[in-house]
Image (cartoon, rainbow, N blue to C red):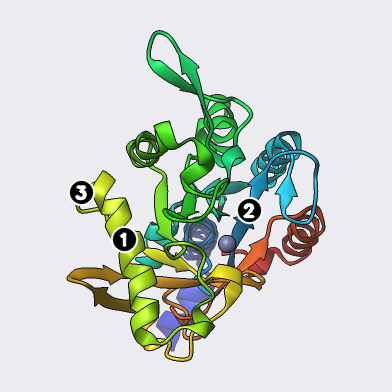
Amino acid sequence: MEYIKTMMFNPKIVARFLTFSLISIIILVFLFSTNSALFAQIANHKGKIMILEYHKIDYPEGRWTRTPQNFRRDLERFYVKGYQLIRLGDFLEGKIHVKKGKTPLILTFDDSSPGQLRFIPDGKDGYRVDPNCAVGILESFYASHPDFGLAATFFVLPAANPPNRLFNQPEYAHEKLRYLVRKGFEIGNHTYWHATLSKMNSEGVKRQLGLAVKAIQEVISGYSPRALSLPMGIYPKDKTTLLQGSYDGIPYKHAGIMMVSGGPAVAPDHPSFDPLYIPRIQAVEKEITYWLRYFDKHPEERY
Ligand SMILES: [Zn+2]
């Protein structure tokens, strides 16, 4: 007891105690702040990701058409709001990597219409990409904003009637597929000719999916589309044929089946993720504005 009393009123010990307390507080504050910074770098795995679905890039603006100017403006808006492009294939594999503070965003284009990828004949190299088509706009935006990334999936139609057969320049059709893959874009399955799958039996569905893969592989050997976009969002009666199967010895395997609507998507590690039903957002003015505002108001829901 005598010892404790002495200690309590010894000014040296009191000073040491105060110093110790102060250092402890400093250490705690430091640990807290570094931990907060650490947490800020960890993605919000419960968050949602916008998978945008574009159709025509052309004139005039319409229900299924975005003008080149509006498409360029979309990219500007995404960039300013902190979005960064990732590949759909990477998303489906759960490889969702963006820079600190950025939100992943996925672009998809359905129907291989002419304004998505147009080549202009050029004497020197044979061709150049039209700066006013979707790929041209994406590439020039990436050149001036490299941290935005360069990625998009093109759900192509190898046997549709013109103008939707592989971007509508038959002389360049194969080179366009090779160009996309060379530049890091992805090619997706959208059936052989935009088939209404609900009208087909299992064999018919497999035929549509397998023939599309065959046509792509005839140009790029071994290329296997990672995703299927359902024409008009219509499912066949037997959905088991969608994820994997084979037709006439041509196997296909899709990690995700893309719907035509449904809002933003959860990531593959989310309990409610279902590869058969991956929602997308139609890339029209109203929808884009709605969802950008939504995530501005609810940043905690951003991935
Ligand atoms: Zn379509």
Mark 1 and 3 residues: CB-CB less than 8 Å, in contact? no
Residue at the spot x=32%, y=52% of the render? 216
**Quadrant of residue 185 within the rendered picture:** top left
Residue at the spot x=69%, y=63% of the render? 299
- Horizontal side, residue 214 vs residue 299: left or right: left
Residue, disc 2: 54
The answer to whether 203 is drawn above or below residue 229 in the figure is below
Front one among 153 and 46: 153
In primary-sequence order, the first of circles 2 and 1 is: 2
In primary-sequence order, the first of circles 2 and 3 is: 2
Q: Nearer the viewer, mark 2 or mark 3?
A: 3
The residue tagged with tag 3: helix, strand or loop?
A: loop
Query: What type is the residue that disc 1 sits on?
Result: Val
**Residue 44 rendering spot, x and y as whole percentages:** 53, 67
Q: Is residue 118 visible?
A: yes
Query: What type is the residue that disc 2 sits on?
Result: Tyr
Front one among 92 and 117: 117
